[in-house]
Amino acid sequence: MKVLVPIAKVPDTTSKISFVENNTKFNTDGVTFIMNPTDEWYALTRAIELKETGKATEVIVMSVGGADYEPIIRKALAIGADRAVRVDAEPVDAFFVATQIAEYVKNENIELVITGKETIDYNSFQVGGMVAELLDWPAFALVNKLELNGKTATVTREIEGGTETAEASLPLVICATKDLAQARIPNMKGIMSAKTKPLQVLPPKQVETRTRVISYALPEKSKQVKLVSPDNIAELIRLLHEEAKVI
Amino acid sequence: MAVLTFVEVADAKVKKASLEAAAYGSKIAETNGVESIAVVLGEAGIEELASLGKVGVNRVLHASDARFNTFDSKAFAKAVSEAAQKVNASIVVLSFNQNGKLLGPRLAVRLGAGYVPGASEVPVTENGTLKVKKNVFSGKASAIYEVTTPIKVIALSPNSYPVAKKEAVASVEAFIPTLSDNDFSVRFISVEKVQGSIPLTEADIVVSGGRGLKGPENWWMIEDLAKEMGAATACSRAVADVDWRPHHEHVGQTGITVRPNLYIAVGISGAIQHLAGVNQSKVIVVINNDPEAPFFKAADYGIVGDAFEVMPKLIEEYRKFKAAH
C-alpha cells in the first residue's frame, strides 16, 4: 500500500512579512523557506511510521513547484520518504495543485494521501479536501490519530470542544494535525541517502485558474497598549466594560 | 439566483459558527437582491430551523435524514451541491470551522467553483466577479481574493461577522437529496467531549497561560478566572510541549487560531508564532512581570506585574463586577 504525502514550501514562522510591486506580490527578500510544519511533523512522519510497522509499502512525497522546492524535498527524503516527485510548475492556486496530486495518485495506484493541515502562509486548508473530491474518496481533516487495520482506517479528529472517532475504508485522504506523530530530525545517514533517492520531475496538467490574490495589506500599525497598575485591577475591569465593551 | 448557506446543527442547536455564516450569507443575498437560503442536513427541530429567519434566512431546505446526523464530507458535499443546483445558487457560504475546512474545498470542486477559505469581510460583487478579504500569513497580513467562476464558494472565518437578530421566521421545506447508502463512506464510532469546558474556537473570551505560571499546579488561576468569565482556557506552545497542559489548548501558528472578543494572556511572552494565533482577537489583555515582553506591543491593555499577585485580585474584582451587573 503506497502512501503519498504532498509537501508545501512556506516562509519560516519567524519571517517578517512584507510585499512588493504595489502590494501585489510577497517579498521573498531575506526570507528562509521551510517545509510546511504540519506536513513535516505529522503527515510525513506518520507515513514513515506506517511503513516501519509494515502497514505501508512505500512513502512518496510530492510537491508542485519550481526547482527551488528541492531543498525541502531532499529534507523529506532525509527524514525517511522513499522517493519524491515534483510537478514542475508555479502552484497558481489550490485547485491547480490538487489536480496535479489527484492525477499522480490515479496513475500510481496510491491508496492513502496524508497532508498536513493548512499551510502557514495562506492558511487555506483546501488541497486535501480538493484531492479527496477529485478522486471521490472519503476524507478526514484535523486528524490526530490514525490506525490502519488492513483496509480499514480508524481516525480521531478534532471537533468543537473535543474529538470524534470514526472509521472509513481505503482509499482515503487524511489531513493531519498535532499529535498524529512524533516529529523527527534527519540524521546523518538519512541526509546522505537522500542525495541518491529518486526525485522524478513531471510536467503539469493544465487547468484553468479559479482564484487569484489581487492585493495584500499589512495590519494597521501596532496597537498602543494602555497600562493599568497591578494595584488597581478594578480599573482594568472598568476599562474592559466601559471602554472596550467586551465584558 | 440565490445565496445558499450550509448550516450545521449539533445537539438540536444551530452551531454558533453556522449562525454567523447564515447571517453573513443573508447579508450577501440582501446586497445582491437575491434570496437567502439555508441547507441543513440531519435531524433537527423545526422551530430551531425557522429561527434562522432572525438572521435573515428566507427559507430552509431540510434533509431530515438520520444518516446525516454525523459528518461525512463526501456525502455532505454531494447533498449540499445538489441543494446549490436546485436553488440555482451563485454563491455558497459555509463556516471555516472544523467540518467546513473539509467540506468547502470538496464543494468547490464539485460545483466547478472558485473557493475562498477563511473570508473575514463581506465580499464585493460586480459583473460576476467577487472580491473578498481574507487573512494570510497567520494574521500577519490580509489579502484580497478575486473569483471569476460562475459559482463561488466562501468559507467564513469564525468570530469575524457579528450576528444581528430581528423578528422574522424562515420557511422550512423538506429536501431529499438523491444519495444512496454507498455515498456514505464514514462509520461514526464515538465523540469524546472535553469535560465541562467551552470549545476554544467558539469562545467569546479566552484566558490563556504560559511558562510564567511556573507549573501545572498553578493553573487554578487560569481555570478560576475562565470559570468566572464563562471563558475557554488556552496555553502557549512551550506549556503544551512540556505537558503542563493538553495539546488541544495550544494556541499559535502551529496550534489553534482563535478570534475571541477578549483574549487574556497570563505569563506569555508573546513570541511571533503565538501572536499569529491570537492577533485577530478583538481585545487583548497581557499580564506579565517583564515590561519588555513583546506581547505588550500587541496588547490593548497591559498589567506589568506578578501573575501570582495579579490573578487572585483579578478573579476577586471580576466576581465583584459580576455581582453588580
Image: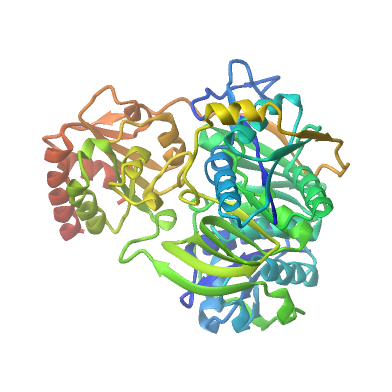
Q: Is residue A170 left or right of residue A66?
A: left
Q: Nearer the viewer, residue B163 or B63?
A: B63
What residue lies at 66% left-to-right and 37% top-to-bottom?
A: B144
Q: Residue at x 46, y 45 (%)?
A: A182
Residue A123 visible in the shown view: yes
- Horizontally, is A72 left or right of B202 in the view? right
Q: Residue A22's spot in the image, x, y percent? A: 69, 21
Looking at the image, which is closer to me, B215 or B324?
Answer: B215
Quadrant location of residue B176? Answer: bottom right
**Lateral position of residue A134 relative to residue A47, left or right:** right
Q: Position of residue A16 (x, y in %)?
A: 52, 22
A189 and B314: which is toward the camera:
A189
Residue drawn at x 72%, y 37% is A84
Residue A89 x %, y % = 81, 33
The quadrant where residue B35 appears: bottom right
Looking at the picture, does residue B17 appear above or below residue B302?
A: below
On-image quarter of the N terminus of chain A: bottom right
